[in-house]
């Protein structure tokens, strides 16, 4: 039986995707360009389109990510965005620090938000 390392070398098992802000923005820009071309925001990409996105991303990023890895990243970003909008949506006494990109609010506000959902803690920096 082949080792995991030899399977990875032979591209039978994809390497774990490592995402940094530059490559994340690259993926977002490619997906945004595709949405602009179709002029249909809010739709899901079909398999053929994901393949085109994969090829474009891998060429630009000098990576070998699979279609599933790209889609998983976009799904994760979408989930974070939904949570962010729920967290800050109708609030009047919170601000986003443009330099640090951190929500600034008092401790009572954060305590209330974290009690509602522990997922909100990812936006809280101590």
Image (spheres, rainbow, N blue to C red):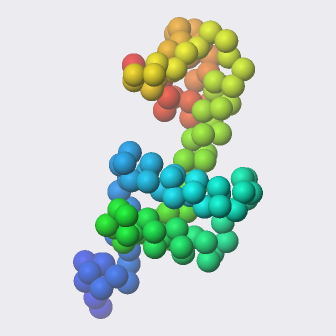
**Picture quadrant of residue 113:** top right
Q: Nearer the viewer, residue 1 or 17?
A: 17
Q: What residue is shown at x 38% (from left), y 69% (from top)? A: 59
Q: What residue is shown at x 68% (from left), y 16% (from top)? A: 91
**Picture quadrant of residue 100:** top left
Is residue 121 depicted above or below 82 in this figure?
Answer: above
In the image, 46: left or right of 54?
right
In the image, 15: left or right of 104?
left
Quadrant that contains the C terminus: top left
In the image, 28: left or right of 117?
left
Q: What residue is shown at x 65% (from left), y 55% (from top)? A: 36
Can residue 3 be seen by looking at this rendering? no
Residue 119: percent from left, percent from top: 56, 35
Residue 55: percent from left, percent from top: 46, 73
Farthest-out residue, bottom: 1
Residue 37: percent from left, percent from top: 65, 61
Q: Nearer the viewer, residue 77 or 12?
A: 77
Residue 41: percent from left, percent from top: 72, 53
In the image, 26: left or right of 44?
left
Q: What residue is shown at x 65% (from left), y 57% (from top)? A: 35
Is residue 25 depicted above or below 61 in this figure?
Answer: above
């Amino acid at each position: 039986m082949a080792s995991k390392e030899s399977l990875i070398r032979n591209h039978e098992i994809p390497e774990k995707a490592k995402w940094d802000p530059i490559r994340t923005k690259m993926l977002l820009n490619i997906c945004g360009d595709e949405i602009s071309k179709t002029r249909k925001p809010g739709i899901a990409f079909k398999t053929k389109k994901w393949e085109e996105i994969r090829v474009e991303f891998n060429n630009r990023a000098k990576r070998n990510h699979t279609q599933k890895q790209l889609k998983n990243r976009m799904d994760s970003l979408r989930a974070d965005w939904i949570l962010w909008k729920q967290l800050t949506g109708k609030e009047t006494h919170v601000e986003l620090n443009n330099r640090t990109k951190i929500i600034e609010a008092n401790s009572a506000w954060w305590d209330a938000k974290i009690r509602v959902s522990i997922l909100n803690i990812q936006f809280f920096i101590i």
